[in-house]
Image: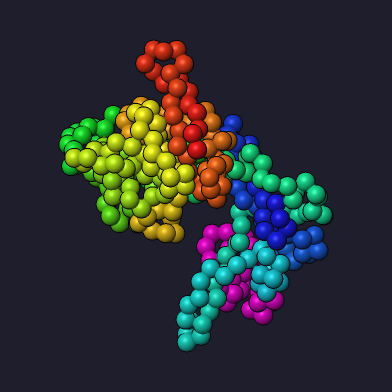
Amino acid sequence: MKKEENCCMLAIKYKNKTLASQTKIIDFEKIKHISSDVSKRIIKELLTSPLYPKEIARRLNINEQIVYYHIRNLYKAGFLEIAKKEQVNGIITKYYKISSNAFSILLDYPKDFLNEKNDFEKVYEFLMPFVTNGKMNSLIIFGSPDPHGPTRSRAKDLKIAADLCLFLGSFLIEASEEYAKLDIDVKESELKKNNIIVIGGPGVNTIAAKINEKLPIRFAKKINERYLAIYSSFSKKYYEEDTQGIVLKTKNPFNNEKYLLLIAGRRYMGTRAAMLSLLKHLKDICKGNKYNEKIFGHIVEGVDINSDGVIEDTIILE
């Protein structure tokens, strides 16, 4: 971790689950700004919602100038950040909020902090922002089991969707609103406002079909609305086996401020291979593509170890 990044990963045990959160590093000499009784009371008020100093002073029943003094110090020290600016009584007013869920105080920056990210940090970075602070922060979209789309195909990915939900559930501490939908039920507004996880290729998932041409790893060689291969723009290679699939994390094509996770294959076996890669080889999936390390995109292939027609493991092709 580089010092100028001013943050690191914090792992804690909570109700038999391992939770991860970003913790902001505060220099030792800045502890004094959070030690006073007034500072503590201000932070307690800001835990619920962003507020402007005059409102904080009213709630705490203390002099407004005293609140401004502590707000300035807390802001400069990094404990607070500006949430928004609004016009109040003709004056532009700044609303403040807590800048992080957790803070860490370091007396020095050890040399081992400057090394490359460890496996835990890579997994956390990959899963963020789909799961945030123990809560689901994405919409899972899988193909309808009924005939639909140009090919009138039936998706068979319900078990894979269930496996994904169980996998992500191990990182959750509370249930959230509905976060899984059939492709035929998803509204355009939902695609724009959410991080999305898309299961299944364009033949069985209409959302996958909408985004396919915009992806760096995509389905190609289309004949009569059916795709015959997976194409990688990194290696310039085509992959044509039914047991091959894609695991790709990239920006959401519907909203560049959100993210997309695609788990898909040419056929059901390819999608299963992609899901198995997440379950069995997550640390390797969280690394960049070997042709472009900045992209979390991989092509995987399922392996039938027992020759029983069932994929038990996978290998990462790129």
Along the viewing direction, whichever of 193 and 118 lies nearer the viewer = 118
Q: Looking at the image, which residue sits at the far bottom?
A: 90
Please indicate whether residue 16 sits to the left or right of residue 39 in the image: left
Residue 216 in sight from this viewpoint: yes
Q: Quadrant of residue 43?
A: bottom right
Coloration mode: rainbow
* Residue for point 28% across, 38% down: 227
Q: Residue 154: where, in percent of width, then height?
A: 22, 32
Please indicate whether residue 31 sits to the left or right of residue 154 in the image: right
Q: Residue 166: where, in percent of width, then height?
A: 44, 31
Along the viewing direction, whichever of 206 and 266 lies nearer the viewer = 266
Q: Would you say residue 55 sits in the magenta stretch? A: yes
Q: Quadrant of residue 244?
A: top left
* Residue for point 59% across, 74% down: 53
Along the viewing direction, whichever of 69 and 5 lies nearer the viewer = 5
Residue 197 in sight from this viewpoint: no
Q: Which residues are magenta?
A: 42-70
Q: Residue 12: where, in percent of width, then height?
A: 64, 40
Please indicate whether residue 222 sits to the left or right of residue 113 in the image: left
Please indicate whether residue 52 sits to the left or right of residue 248 in the image: right
* Residue for point 66% across, 63% down: 79
Height in image: 156 above or below 133?
above
- Dominant SS in magenta: helix
Q: Residue 249: where, in percent of width, then height?
A: 46, 46
